[in-house]
Each structure stands twice: as structure tokens, then as C-alpha cells.
Image (spheres, grey):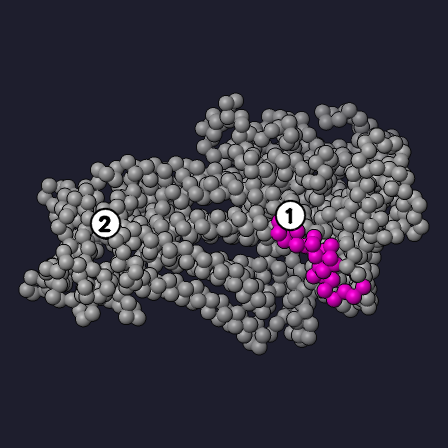
């Protein structure tokens, strides 16, 4: 504005723009001492951002415009009397410089930033120390290696990759396929293996990982303060407000081509839902850990397609055959059978044909195809896990994490703070040092007992909530204004099931949020040494609670409801309430309603929160930052509410949400709970896999958008696989077999129909089955208070009513209302079915697991071929180095000093001596003359 430049004028002299290039540490023309007011600063930054998008080449770089910012530390520079924090920051930053990192402070705003750049020589040194797998030079015969990626279904999927199905393949013009290179553990002594001088050899994710590795191990205290180590403790002590790597570009500046914008447009967009995921590019941006999550989520979603198709077939089979179902026809055509009241006193008799609609609905989910679907899903679960192992083995090899083993972790800062006065120590055999240890009897055991007792109390609370809902359902049976209306029995049963399922979902959701805080607090009490131990303990608590919280009501309907109701002369009661009874045909319909509402409702709530929460939290953080009310400034008396001006990448990223250790755990947890729904209880809800598939399609893209748009960039981390979640799914698969067997045997009428058809009815049909399942009751035998008080006129002369049980009629002189012999035969048949089903399906699972190797044979051959080529190359190059050393320092037969010339071979056109000298000259220019002596010593 001081030069009369209008921001919207596109015809601006580039020299003027160049003169305005700045960072916040630079002075503008016409201003003495930098920015004078916040308004002027905002105006100039806005002008610079509009006219020159990367702000003079320093959008994500140092002031020299060359060195890229790999990591940023942020702290409040306006806090008074903060000498101790200043001392720690000074020591910490000095130690970072000693490690070879280059830092540059920016102190022009209330939030001060320390920009960190990792030079190539430091990256090279720490890549070797961290045992990173890096691509080697292109070998002569590597084109002969078969590098075809593993795919689900092999040739079938390749068929769908033909031109007519190209719309699902990622755009290779935008996501270019990486040139295939073999990987080898990085070693500076084997420099001939790597093209370390290539500008893109050390990728941004590698530099970020190296920077974080150094930050986590740098000291910030004096020598006697042996536990003052690492960035995590500095963040915990609020010496720094935040520490984060920078995103690649900003979504507000789409004209700047960058990986982040490309991923947002081509991967995180919901309109790209049908496209494959660019996993290699995700890995390059976020690291292996996050990329492995998306690889697993994509694989799981693809596997759900087959389960959804079979589930739809089961559903449509029931939908197309319910009118021809013999049992439904008998119920709908029966105009004479009077049923006993469903509640005490206030309920009246009702007719069997009132359950006509209910029987139709029951047949849709409980038909002859159900057992086929149950067996299929049990085998599907095993097939899914085995194919995932094959798929992940291919990914592990491609990403170089097959043999990855995590390094030793330092103790948690909170753990050390609680033990600062402890006299007991133990010798750490990994680090070779003494560490404080909590006394077992006085500290560790009491904290564990206290923690798990509170956890147990909350689990009992979750079960109590289910018990309360059961009592609520029982009390509904006696409500006159519901049962006194003219609705038929089907409407009432569906209404009760739906309302209680919604209430259960609401209670479970509230308990989940409450329990999360309790679980964190209880785990904080425990003495967990490392962050991994802390995370495992916390994750186990939360998963067990959610398992009980979401599944307990479904287990109740599947295995308890309607199993012990008693009979009209002697009902079994809980707190004076009659136990619930299943509808005509079993409890499978109610189980389906409960499962559908809880599963689908949970997914809908999660998707809404997935969209709204990150956006709201980010906007709230920006709003608090504008007002100077950020949580870190709560004790600040000098900030003056100054707004943080965002005119570069680190200030823009500062307002994004921070990653924490549970960020990815929460994503896994949602999917594992969903996996339990579609395996353990899938018999009752064949449409479960379809709803899971639809949810996951959106979940994948929304997670991607959340990580790219609302969260700071995550530190790239290496993992071998999805961790403990594979074992959890394996256990759920075993539970699913047992659960399906019991649901079919005890919650559906499959076994009673089978027994009646082949052992009772002489014509081997289901004719008369409904009457067979109904027992007779003499209304004069009602227990006190159970008979209808004011029956309708049409029921005034009823003497016999029917109820759904297997009991002797009242005219049986010896055993009235007792269990008949065939009831025990049927019970034995149910138990036999459970045993046979479980063993047969388990045997099939074992055969499937045995028949499918964990690593594809193609990949095994590829690994062997790669190892052979690499070993041959290393042997040849080492031999050349040895021959060269002998030729340079050996003595000839005639006693004169000889020099053996390096001959040409298949892998180069210049001698090794010439290559070495050329490399040294490049490094002298790049890193300075100090690097040359070390390089010469390395090369002999």
C-alpha cells in the first residue's frame, strides 16, 4: 500500500513484487524496525500471499530460500519469568546443532518458531544408524524379476483391470509408477550400492523421520540431569507448545503443485470413491504406519464385496419366498387359535394371525439360506485373514519393512517424573544403564489394583445399563397405553425392539466417551515405563469396554431372551417383572433390529463426527488463536491477544490439530468393532456386510481428508503390519463360529423345524409345525394377578389359550405343564448341532489356512532372485575394491611399485578410481572440504 500497489491488479512489475519478498523477520520498505501494527502486518502479508504465493521463496524454507524446513518447534515467546524453560530450550537447541541439524529461529510474533533443516550428511549418517531400507542402483538383470503385485482373486481381478474397467485404476499421469528398484539396508561403506547424490534419494519423509529421531534423543539438561532427554518430555513440560513436520503445500493455494493437493483431489475426495488408493504415494507422504492402515482398510473393504453379495442373496431369497413359506401361511390363515396374554392383568388375549406380518419378516432373515450364509461367513473370515497375510507380505517387501524391528524406547517423561525420588533402580540390559523402578508392593501393585478395580466397576456399569434396558423392555409389557391400542402384535414387537435399540445406542455412545476419560486416567496411575506399554494397556482397556458396551445387549437377545420365561401358571420373574418372550419364530427378528440400529447408527454417528469434529476443533483453535485465548496462553499476561498471522507453511500448520498416540488407534477400533458385528452376529443380519461396505467407502476418503486437511502432518513411522489387531480379528473369527452355531441352534427355529419334519411328521413336511410349537394352557390355572382383568367380549368364554413353549397339556394327568420327552431330544439335537457345526467349520478353516501360504510363491521367488543379484553385485564390487587397493599399494615381482588399472565392466564406463575422485569433488562442493578426508578414508 505504501507504494500504491493494488492487490487485485494483475499487471504488476515483477521487480516490485521481488522487493516485497520477505519473511516476518524482514523489514518492509517505508517501515523502520519491521511491522509497526498488526493491521499493517496483516495487510502486507495478505498482499504478499496474493501476489507471490510462496512469499519470496520462503513459504516452507529458511530465509536463504534454499534449505527446506523439515521440522518446526513452537513455543510462546511472550511468557514472563520463564528462565528455566529458556535454559532448557537453549541447551536442547545447542545439542541439536552438535548433532548436525541446522536451525533458524523466527521470533516476530507471539508464537516463536524454531525451523529445523536436516543436511544430507546427517540424513546419511542416521539412515545407517536407523537401518533404513533404501533403493539401490539399477542392476543389469533386474528387468527379469517378476514384480507383479498381489491381487485378490488373481486372474479374476486382472480381468476386471481390462480397458473397460479402467475407471477404477488410479491415474498414472498424476500418480506416476515408481521405477522398480531393489532395497538394501543403507550403509555408507557400501556407497556404490546407492545413488545418494541424487536430489530425490533422501525423500522428505526420510528427512522428517531422521529429524524426529534426533529430537527424541537429544538432551536438554545438565550432565547430572540424566533423564532430561527428548522432545516428548519437553512437550509434556510445556517447554514447547508443539513440534511438527510441515505439510507439502497448502490447500488454499491449489495453483502450487504439491503432493498434498494432489492427494486431496485424487485420493481424499469422496467423488473418487471407486478409485484404487495410491498406496505408495501415501507411504511416501505419511510413512509406513498410516499407509499400512489405509492398505488394510482398502483390502478389508474389497473383501466385503463378496460378503455383501452373498448377504444380499440371502436377503432376497427370504424376500422372494416369504409368501410361499408354509409356516407363515399357517399363521396367517389360522383364525381360531387364541394366544395367552403377553403381560399380567392389563394385557388381553390375542389371535395367532395377529403375528402374520412378524412371521413374514422372520422368514426374510431366518430361512434355509441362513445356515449357508453362516458357513460362508465363517470361511470368509478365515479367507480374509489368510489373504491379508499374503497381501501384506507383498507390501512389506515393497516398502522394506519385512525384517523391521523397533528400536529400544526411552522411558516416558511422566513415568520418570513419578519416580524422581525413587531409590530403587534396575539395570537396563538394552541401554546398559541404571533406571528408576517403582517398588512392586508399595506402588506398582496398589496402582494396578486400583486401576483395574475402577475399570471393572465401569464394565459392571455397562452391564447394568443393559440390565436397565431389559427391565425397561419388561415394564413396557404392562403399559396400557401401548398394549391397549388397536395395533397388531407385529407393530408392537417391532416398536419395542426399535425404541430399546435406539436407547441402547444412545447409552452406549455416552458411556464410551465417559469411559475414554476414565481409561486414560486409570492408565496414567499405572507405572507404564514406555509409551508402547502405556498405549497397549490403554488400548486393551478401551477395546474390552467397547466390546462389552456394544455387544452385551446383542448377546442378551441372542442367547438369553426368551429362553427361561416360564409358563402362565408359574412365570419366571426379575424384580417382579415377567421375563421377555420371543415372537413367533424365535428372537432372530429382534436380534436383527437390535444389530441393525446399533451397527448402522454407530456408523452414522461416527461418520458425522468424522466430518464435523475435526473441522469444528480446527476452527475453534483458529478462533482462540485470533483472540489470544489458546490453551497454552492461559497463564500468559503479556501476549496481549495478538493474532497469529499465517503467511508461511509453519504458521498455517500451527493451527491444525495435533497428532497423538491414539489417533490411529481410534480408527482401527471403529473398524474392529464393525468387524465383530459382521462376523459374530452376521447370521441375524445378512445386510450387515453391505452396510459395512458402504460405510467403509466413505470412511476411507473421510479419514484421508481429515489427515490431510485438518491434522498436522504425522511423523513417518515404520511398522511391519497392523500389530495386535490381526490377532484380535483372529479371535473374533473363532468366536464368530461358536456364536453362529448357538444363534442357529437356539435363537432360530431351524432345529425345531428339522426335528419336526424328519422325526415327528410322517409325511416329512412342515405342515402343522406352528401348532406343534404351541403349548395348551387352561385359563383357570393362571397364577394370581396374571389373568386379564377386563377381557374383550370375544374372549369372555375362552377356556384354553396357547403359548410358545414345549410343555405337556393341562389334561396330562401325570405331568401337566412339564417338559415332554421330545423337548429333551430337541435340546440334545441343538447341542449336537453346535458341536458338529463348530468342528466342521473349524476344520474347513484349518484346511483353508493350510492351503493358502502366508507368502505367495511368486514373491518368494522374487525375493530369492533379488538376493542373488544383490549378492553377486556386492561380491563383484568388493572384489574390485580389493584389487584396486592391492594394485595401489602392492609391490611387483621386480621390486618396483605397481598400479593396477581398474578395468571396465558391465556396471560402469569409468574406472573406480575416477568415480571415487569425481564423487569426492562433488562432496567437497556440496558439503565443504571437511567431508573429503573422511570420504577418502572410507574409500581406502
For numbered disc 1, what is the local secondary structure? helix
Between 287 and 818, the one lying in front of the other is 818
Between 225 and 163, the one lying in front of the other is 163
Instruction: Judge whether residue 171 can be spotted in this image.
Output: yes
In the picture, the disc for residue 355 is 2
Expressed as whole percent of the image width and height from the top left, the position of residue 587 reads 29, 53
Around disc 2, counting alpha carbons within 10 Å, would you say few (fewer than 14), some (14 to 19), or many (20 or more)? many
Expressed as whole percent of the image width and height from the top left, the position of residue 42 reads 81, 48
Q: Name which quarter of the figure residue 375 lies in.
A: top left
User: With respect to residue 84, does 192 lie above or below?
Assistant: above
For numbered disc 2, what is the local secondary structure? helix
Q: Quadrant of the N terminus?
A: top right
Residue depicted at 15% across the width and 54% down the height: 338
Query: Left or right: 63 with respect to 141?
Result: right
Q: Give the residues in magenta.
A: 615-639
Instruction: Judge whether residue 119 can be spotted in this image.
Output: no
Q: Quadrant of the C terminus?
A: top right
In the picture, the disc for residue 710 is 1
- Distance between the Cα atoms at labels 2 and 1? 52 Å
Residue depicted at 20% across the width and 60% down the height: 348
Q: Which residue is most to the bottom?
A: 442
Image mark count: 2
Amino acid at each position: 500500500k505504501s507504494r500504491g500497489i493494488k492487490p487485485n491488479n494483475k499487471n504488476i512489475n515483477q521487480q516490485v513484487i521481488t522487493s516485497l519478498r520477505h519473511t516476518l523477520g524482514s523489514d518492509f520498505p517505508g517501515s523502520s524496525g519491521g511491522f509497526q501494527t498488526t493491521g499493517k502486518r496483516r495487510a502486507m502479508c495478505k498482499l504478499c500471499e496474493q501476489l507471490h504465493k510462496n512469499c519470496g521463496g520462503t513459504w516452507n524454507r529458511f530465509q536463504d530460500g534454499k534449505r527446506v524446513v523439515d521440522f518446526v518447534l513452537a513455543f510462546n515467546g511472550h511468557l514472563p519469568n520463564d528462565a528455566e524453560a529458556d535454559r532448557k530450550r537453549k541447551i536442547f537447541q545447542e545439542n541439536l546443532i552438535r548433532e548436525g541439524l541446522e536451525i533458524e529461529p523466527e521470533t516476530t510474533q507471539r508464537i516463536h518458531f524454531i525451523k529445523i533443516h536436516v543436511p544430507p550428511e546427517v540424513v546419511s549418517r542416521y539412515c545407517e544408524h536407523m537401518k533404513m531400507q533404501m533403493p539401490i542402483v539399477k542392476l543389469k538383470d533386474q528387468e527379469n524379476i517378476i514384480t507383479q503385485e498381489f491381487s485378490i482373486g488373481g486372474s479374476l481381478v486382472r480381468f476386471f483391470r481390462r480397458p473397460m474397467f479402467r475407471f477404477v485404476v488410479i491415474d498414472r499421469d498424476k500418480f506416476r509408477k515408481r521405477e522398480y528398484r531393489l532395497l538394501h539396508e543403507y550403509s555408507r561403506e557400501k556407497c556404490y550400492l546407492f545413488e545418494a547424490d541424487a536430489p530425490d534419494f533422501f525423500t522428505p519423509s526420510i528427512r522428517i523421520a531422521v529429524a524426529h529421531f534426533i529430537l527424541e534423543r537429544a538432551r536438554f539438561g545438565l550432565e547430572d540431569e540424566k533423564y532430561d532427554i527428548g522432545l516428548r518430555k519437553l512437550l509434556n513440560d510445556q517447554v514447547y507448545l508443539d513440534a511438527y513436520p510441515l505439510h507439502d503445500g497448502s490447500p488454499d493455494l491449489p495453483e502450487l503443485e504439491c503432493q498434498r493437493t494432489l492427494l486431496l483431489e485424487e485420493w481424499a475426495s469422496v467423488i473418487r470413491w471407486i478409485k484404487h488408493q495410491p498406496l505408495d504415494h501415501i507411504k511416501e507422504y505419511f510413512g509406513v504406519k498410516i499407509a499400512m492402515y489405509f492398505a488394510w482398510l482398502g483390502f478389508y473393504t474389497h473383501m466385503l464385496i463378496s460378503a455383501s453379495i452373498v448377504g444380499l442373496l440371502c436377503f432376497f431369497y427370504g424376500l422372494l419366498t416369504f409368501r410361499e413359506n408354509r409356516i407363515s401361511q399357517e399363521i396367517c390363515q389360522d383364525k381360531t387359535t387364541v394366544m395367552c396374554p403377553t403381560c399380567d392383568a392389563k394385557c388381553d388375549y390375542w389371535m395367532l394371525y395377529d403375528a402374520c406380518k412378524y412371521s413374514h419378516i422372520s422368514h426374510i432373515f431366518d430361512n434355509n439360506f441362513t445356515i449357508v450364509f453362516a458357513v460362508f461367513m465363517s470361511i470368509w473370515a478365515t479367507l480374509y485373514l489368510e489373504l491379508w497375510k499374503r497381501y501384506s507380505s507383498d507390501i512389506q517387501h515393497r516398502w522394506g519393512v519385512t525384517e523391521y524391528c523397533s528400536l529400544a524406547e526411552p522411558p516416558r517423561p511422566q513415568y520418570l517424573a513419578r519416580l524422581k525420588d525413587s531409590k530403587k533402580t534396575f539395570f537396563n540390559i538394552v541401554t546398559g544403564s541404571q533406571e528408576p523402578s517403582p517398588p512392586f508392593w508399595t506402588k506398582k501393585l496398589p496402582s494396578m489394583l486400583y486401576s483395574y478395580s475402577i475399570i471393572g466397576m465401569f464394565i459392571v456399569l455397562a452391564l447394568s445399563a443393559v440390565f436397565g434396558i431389559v427391565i425397561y423392555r419388561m415394564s413396557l409389557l404392562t403399559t396400557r397405553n401401548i398394549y391397549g391400542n388397536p395395533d397388531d402384535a407385529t407393530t408392537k414387537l417391532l416398536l419395542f425392539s426399535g425404541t430399546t435399540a435406539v436407547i441402547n445406542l444412545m447409552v452406549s455412545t455416552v458411556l464410551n466417551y465417559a469411559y475414554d476419560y476414565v481409561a486414560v486416567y486409570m492408565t496414567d496411575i499405572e507405572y507404564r515405563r514406555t509409551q508402547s506399554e502405556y498405549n497397549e494397556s490403554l488400548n486393551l482397556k478401551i477395546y474390552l469396554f467397547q466390546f462389552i458396551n456394544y455387544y452385551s445387549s446383542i448377546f442378551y437377545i441372542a442367547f438369553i431372551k426368551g429362553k427361561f420365561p416360564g409358563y402362565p401358571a408359574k412365570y419366571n420373574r426379575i424384580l417382579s417383572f415377567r421375563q421377555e418372550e420371543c415372537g413367533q419364530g424365535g428372537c432372530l427378528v429382534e436380534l436383527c433390529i437390535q444389530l441393525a440400529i446399533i451397527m448402522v447408527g454407530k456408523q452414522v454417528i461416527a461418520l458425522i463426527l468424522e466430518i464435523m469434529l475435526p473441522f469444528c476443533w480446527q476452527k475453534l483453535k483458529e478462533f482462540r488463536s485470533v483472540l489470544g485465548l489458546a490453551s497454552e496462553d492461559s497463564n500468559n499476561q503479556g501476549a496481549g491477544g495478538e493474532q497469529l498471522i499465517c503467511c508461511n507453511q509453519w504458521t498455517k500448520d500451527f493451527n491444525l490439530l495435533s497428532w497423538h498416540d491414539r489417533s490411529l488407534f481410534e480408527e482401527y477400533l471403529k473398524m474392529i468393532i464393525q468387524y465383530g458385528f459382521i462376523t459374530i452376529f452376521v447370521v441375524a443380519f445378512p445386510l450387515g456386510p453391505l452396510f459395512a461396505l458402504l460405510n467403509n467407502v466413505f470412511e476411507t476418503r473421510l479419514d484421508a481428508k481429515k489427515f490431510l486437511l485438518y491434522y498436522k502432518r504425522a511423523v513417518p513411522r515404520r511398522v511391519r503390519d497392523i500389530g495386535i489387531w490381526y490377532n484380535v480379528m483372529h479371535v473374533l473369527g473363532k468366536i464368530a463360529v461358536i456364536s453362529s452355531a448357538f444363534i442357529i441352534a437356539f435363537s432360530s427355529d431351524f432345529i425345531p423345524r428339522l426335528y419336526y419334519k424328519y422325526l415327528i411328521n410322517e409325511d416329512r413336511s412342515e405342515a402343522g409345525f406352528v401348532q406343534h410349537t404351541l403349548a395348551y394352557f387352561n385359563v383357570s390355572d393362571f397364577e394370581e394377578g396374571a389373568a386379564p382383568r377386563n377381557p374383550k367380549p370375544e374372549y369372555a368364554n375362552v377356556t384354553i389359550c396357547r403359548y410358545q413353549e414345549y410343555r405337556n397339556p393341562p389334561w396330562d394327568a401325570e405331568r401337566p405343564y412339564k417338559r415332554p420327552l421330545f423337548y429333551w431330544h430337541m435340546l440334545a439335537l441343538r447341542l449336537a448341532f453346535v458341536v458338529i457345526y463348530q468342528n466342521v467349520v473349524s476344520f474347513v478353516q484349518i484346511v483353508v489356512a493350510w492351503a493358502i501360504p502366508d507368502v505367495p510363491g511368486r514373491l518368494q521367488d522374487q525375493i530369492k532372485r533379488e538376493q542373488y543379484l544383490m549378492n553377486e553385485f556386492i561380491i563383484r564390487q568388493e572384489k574390485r575394491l580389493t584389487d584396486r587397493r592391492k594394485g595401489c599399494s602392492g609391490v611387483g615381482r621386480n621390486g618396483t611399485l605397481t598400479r593396477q588399472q581398474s578395468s571396465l565392466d558391465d556396471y560402469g564406463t569409468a574406472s573406480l578410481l575416477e568415480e571415487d575422485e569425481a564423487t569426492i569433488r562433488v562432496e567437497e562442493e556440496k558439503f565443504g572440504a571437511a567431508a573429503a578426508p573422511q570420504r577418502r578414508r572410507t574409500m581406502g
